[in-house]
Image: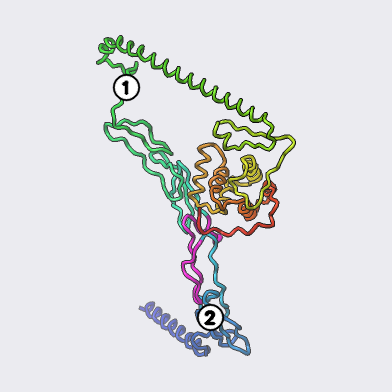
Amino acid sequence: MMRRVNIVDTMYWIIVLFVTANAITLATSDCEKHQVEVEGRCCSECNIGSGVASPCNAGNNTICEACVDGESYSSTSSHTHSCIPCSKCPKNSRVIQECTNSSDTICECDPEFHLTETGECKLCDLCPAGWGASVPCSRTQNTVCNQCTNGAFSKVLSATSGCLVCSVCVPGAQMLQACSATEDTICISLPIYRYPTEDFPDTDNKNSVQNDQSKSNSKQIDIIPLYCAILGAVVVGLLGYVIMVHYRRMKEKRLIREPHDDVEYSKASAGDSGICVEVEHQQKVVPVVLTTSTRIRDLPTSKRREIERSFLQSTKDSRDWQGLARELGFNTKKIANCEIKSQRDSSTPLKHLLTDWGRNDSATVGVFIQAMKNLGRHDVLPTLNVHDTAELCPLVPQNNIV
C-alpha cells in the first residue's frame, strides 16, 4: 500500500513540473504567430511564395519579397531563405508542371529515356536477343536485363520486353527445332516419314520394300536424263555469260583507244554491265573538292570508308556511333535497325548509319561536320578536307526524329 502511494506522488510532481515549465516558456516568449525569436528579438517569417529580401537584424525586422512565377519559388515559410531560382528540365525531357512562386518545375523524361541519379535523362539500355527485361525501362529507372534460362526465350532487341515461355508441341505434332535462348520451339502437325534404320527397322514393310526395289531402281535411272539436261543448261548459260563479258570488254577497249581525252565512264553505266571500268588519265588528276553543301550520298565510296576508319580508330567506346546517330536525329528504333543490319552482313553500324541518313536531302557534309564538333570528334574533320568551313552554321537540334 505504501509503494502505491509513492508512485502516485511521483506522477503528481512530474505533471506539476511540466505545467510550470510550459507556463514559464509562454511567459518569457512575447513573439506572435509566424514569428521566431532570434537573439532576444522577434523576427517575422516570410510566407510560402515569398523569400527573404533583407534578413532580420538589430534595427529592422525581416523584409520579404514575392517570388516571381516562372523565375523563382519558395515552398516553405522561413525567416532566412530567399526565393530559389526555378529549375530547368534537362535534355530529352518535357515539362509536366510549370514553375510557380510556391513550387518548382516538375519534369518528366521522354519515352525510351530514364532519369539518372545526376538528374539527366539517358537513353534506356536495350536487352539483346537471348536476354529479357526483368525490370522494363521507365521514366524513373533504367532497364534491368536478365539472361533467358531453360524454358524461356527472347529474339527481339527491346528495353521493355521480357523473356517468353517456350511453346510446347501439341500431342500428335512433331518438334523440328527445340527451344533455345533466342528461338521458340518449332513444331509441325503433319506426319513425317522416317526411313528405316538399323535402330528402327521397318519389319512390317520389309517384304514390300524388297518387291519394289527393282521399280525404284528403274525410276532412279529415268531421272538421269533430267540431271543431264539441267547440267547442259548450266554449261550453256556459263558459256553465254563468258562470251557476253568478253564482248563488252573488247568494246570498252575500243572506246578507250579512240582519241577522246575528256571522256569519263560513269559508274552507273559500268554497273549496268557488271563490270566497273575506271579510266584515269595520268596527265590529268582532278581531286574531288568537298564543300559544306555536298551531300553525304554523293561522297565517293573510298571517302566514306576513310571517314569510318578515322571515326573508329580513335574511339574509346564502341557505342560512340550511337551518340552520332542521336546528333543526326535517329531514334532508338533506327539505331537498333543499324545494329541489326551490321550483325547480318558483319559490317560496322556506322556504315549503315551513314547510308540511311544519306538518303535525306538535308544530309550534307556541313551537318556532319557540326555533329562531329558537338561530339568533340575534331580528329575526324581533317579526313573531309572541306575548303569553305566558314559557311558552317550551328547544328539546330531536330524536333522531328528520323
Q: Residue 58, how many percent across, how many down? A: 63, 88
Look at 54% across and 78% down and name the residue there: 68
Spot occupied by residue 167 in the image (x, y as percentages of width and height): 34, 39
**Quadrant that contains the N terminus:** bottom left
- Secondary structure at badge 1 equals loop
- Span colored in magenta: 93-122
Q: Is residue 111 magenta?
A: yes
Nearest to N terminus: mark 2 or mark 1: 2
User: Mark 2–mark 1 contact, CB under 8 Å?
Assistant: no
What residue appears at the point 48 percent right and 63 percent down from the top-left corner?
108
User: Along the horizontal axis of the image, is 304 left or right of 18?
Assistant: right
Q: Amino acid at mark 2?
A: Ser
Q: Nearer the viewer, residue 145 or 99?
A: 99
Residue 50 numbered mark, or none? 2
Instruction: Say which amino acid is labelled 1.
Output: Arg
Percent coordinates x, y for residue 83 in the rendering: 56, 77
